[in-house]
Amino acid sequence: MKYIDPHIHCVSRTTDDYQYMARCGVVAVSEPAFWAGYDRSTASSFADYFRHLLEVEPKRAAKYGIQHYAWLCINAKEAENVSLSREVIKLIPPLLDHPLVLGVGEIGLNKNTRNEITVFEEQVDLAARYDQMILIHTPHLEDKHKGTAIITSILKNDKRIKPERVLIDHCEEHTIRVARDNGFWAGLTIYPVTKVTPQRGADILEQFGPKMICVNSAADWGESGPVNLTDTCLEYRSRGHSEQEATEIFYNNPCRFFGQNAKWKLKASE
Ligand SMILES: [Zn+2]
């Protein structure tokens, strides 16, 4: 079976993880720009980070037969610094035509602060002006429902934004409807222990149905890993779902969402 990991931070992972993904049949990944585990001090650090995402990581992935795409933005955590954020946002437009850039992301909220909302709105405007798809980070833990509601209302109020071109990630049981009922795609991020585990992910897929859901590992510099994507698929299959049903979720759905951008080459298997 073939997989796509629609949200993974490869810059933080070892080559062992690429080997693991290749063995399991992961053929493509998408990497949103995010926090690096520490706050960067200047916009030039982000310029280098974007170069890493667009030049270094695709070559690294290609060695394992994996296609690597990226999304650009300033993440919600570092968006607390509004003046730095504005300098970073200025770096983005010239890079949007790059053949491996799928859109603006992962933008969103972390602690739902005024500054985060300001920078979020400016990046939604950037995406709208350049007709870009959007990948959304929703806050973890107790701020999640409130943050998801703020994000979706900002997106809904901007008539230039087409909801089906937006993926709202890190959904849980109490937020998945907020995303899908408003016409957005929903992402499920699977973690080994905290947050949504493979078992809980399979529960959500069964409870809510697979339509417009993309499952990902979001593997980053913290406790996480690409194994959480494949473990969720194994858990789902162990409950009696067919390979075709699993392919719908773990391959076809990402192809359908990303395929709205002509740069994405893989096609859903019908
Ligand atoms: Zn992420």
Image (cartoon, rainbow, N blue to C red):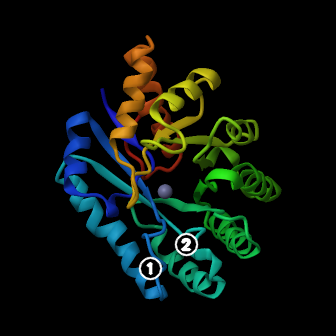
Q: Among all residues in the image, which is located at the extreme left?
A: 63
Quarter in which the N terminus is drawn: top left
Q: Are marks 2 and 1 in contact (CB under 8 Å)?
A: yes
The Cα atoms of the two marked residues, 2 and 1, are separated by 8 Å
Residue found 46% across the figure and 82% down from its top = 40
The amino acid sitting under disc 2 is Ile
**Residue under pointer 1:** 46
Quarter in which the C terminus is drawn: top left
Compared to residue 243, the image places residue 265 above or below, namely below
Q: Quadrant of residue 238?
A: top left
Q: Position of residue 3 (x, y in %)?
A: 35, 35
Nearest the viewer among 257 and 205 is 205
Nearest the viewer among 121 and 241 is 241
Q: How many marks?
A: 2
Compared to residue 153, the image places residue 21 above or below, namely above
- Does residue 203 appear left or right of residue 252 in this picture? right
Give the class, few, some or many, for how many residues have Cα within 10 Å of label 2's Cα (few <14, many ≥20).
many
Compared to residue 245, the image places residue 115 above or below, namely below
Q: Quadrant of residue 173?
A: top right
Mark 2 lies on a secondary structure that is loop
Q: Among all residues in the image, which is located at the extreme top?
A: 240
Nearest the viewer among 251 and 266 is 251
Mark 1 lies on a secondary structure that is helix
The amino acid sitting under disc 1 is Phe
- Does residue 54 appear left or right of residue 60 in this picture? right
- Does residue 154 appear left or right of residue 187 in this picture? right
Q: Using the rendered image of the protein, determine whether residue 270 is visible from the camera's viewpoint.
A: no
Residue found 64% across the figure and 77% down from its top = 80
- Does residue 262 appear left or right of residue 69 in this picture? right
Compared to residue 36, the image places residue 28 above or below, namely above
Residue found 47% across the figure and 65% down from its top = 33
